[in-house]
Amino acid sequence: MERIKKALDLARKERDSKPAEDLTASPEDGRAKESSDLKNIQYSQTRVLKLDTEKLRSNRVLVNNEEPDAATAFKMLRTQVLQRMVAKGWNALAITSPAPEDGKTLVAANLAISLARELHHTVLLVDLDLRNPSIHKYFGMHPERGISDYLLDGAAIGDVLVNPGLERLVILPGRELIENSSELLASPQMGQLVQELKSRYPNRFVLFDLPPILSADDALSFAPYIDAVLLVIREKKTTRFELQHAMELLSAVPVLGTVLNGSVERISSYY
């Protein structure tokens, strides 16, 4: 708690004395260039990594079309998410689940990749499962810094962002477990960061991977900062009670829809 208190005090002082950081990689010509040309983004500050394709494949991260059913499913999910978010003028979506092991983080990663392949948008994927940060594991990354370094130790956000070698996608990874994470997620520092991430570029979608809704109060603490929630449930695991309880807790937040993960039904069977 003492570390968190010091971090919040430091954040308030820095907010009054420092100009805003450049929160994302930007093209050479700045914001206007990103708005008009999203095909040839050049990252001037964000660290660019070359990831191991085999590692991504083993982690079920969809970097190509080798799994057509899964790729098609995420394209369908992408289209529905885009249609509903754009219709509302929203760009900040949280992904959560009722309980652990429902697959929310993998869904968040693959949805982010699928959205980034849509040429009219850039995507920022943020790991806010501060109790169990794992987005970097799915991408096979070993980040030297994570969002905990920004929140607790004053690291510049530009030093934390990573491009995983995929066009139009930037990741704000986690690195270490943070206790009392719900206090940080509800802090003024987090609110300022989220507002900057949401508003800096007009064509950006921000996806937040949040902890399971029934495991802790983190997702509820962060709810005021998001536009909508996508709820991931797992076939033959998520119970009716868990789903009902999760929906009750999320009653004050727009739920964009649910994703059925781990289904044995093949997309190709519909054709």
Image (cartoon, rainbow, N blue to C red):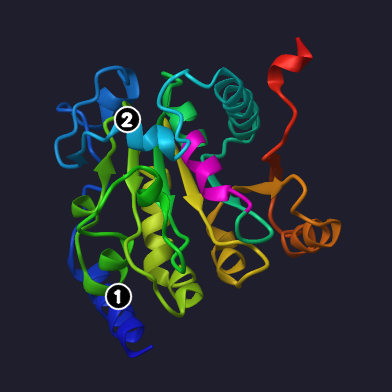
| Residue 207 spot, x, y in % from top left | 48, 44
Q: Is residue 232 above or below residue 165?
A: below
* Residues drawn in magenta: 102-110
Q: Identify the residue at image location x=33%, y=90%.
A: 2
Give the residue number, with chain letter if any, for mark 1: 12
Q: Nearer the viewer, residue 237 or 90?
A: 237
User: Does 45 lie within the magenta span?
Assistant: no
In the image, is residue 220 above or below residue 101? below
Q: Residues within 10 Å of mark 2 (few under 14, many from 20)?
A: some
Q: Residue furthest bottom?
A: 2
Indicate left or right for 45 with 244 as reference. left
Q: Is residue 202 visible?
A: no
Residue pointed to by mark 2: 53
Image point 31% across, 67% down: which residue? 148
Distance Cα–Cα, label 2 vs label 1: 41 Å
Residue 50 pos. (x, y %)? 21, 33
Q: Disc 1 residue type?
A: Arg
Q: Residue at x 72, y 60 (%)?
A: 252
- Give the residue at the far top of this rendering: 271
Q: Quadrant of residue 247?
A: bottom right
Could you tell whether 106 is left or right of 5 in the image?
right
Residue 8 lies in quadrant: bottom left
Q: In the image, what residue type sits under mark 2?
A: Thr
> x%, y% of residue 57?
41, 32
Quadrant location of the C terminus in the rendered image: top right
Q: Nearer the viewer, residue 184 or 30?
A: 184
Q: Nearer the viewer, residue 95 or 51?
A: 51
Residue 188 at x, y percent in the picture: 41, 70
Q: Secondary structure at mark 1?
A: helix
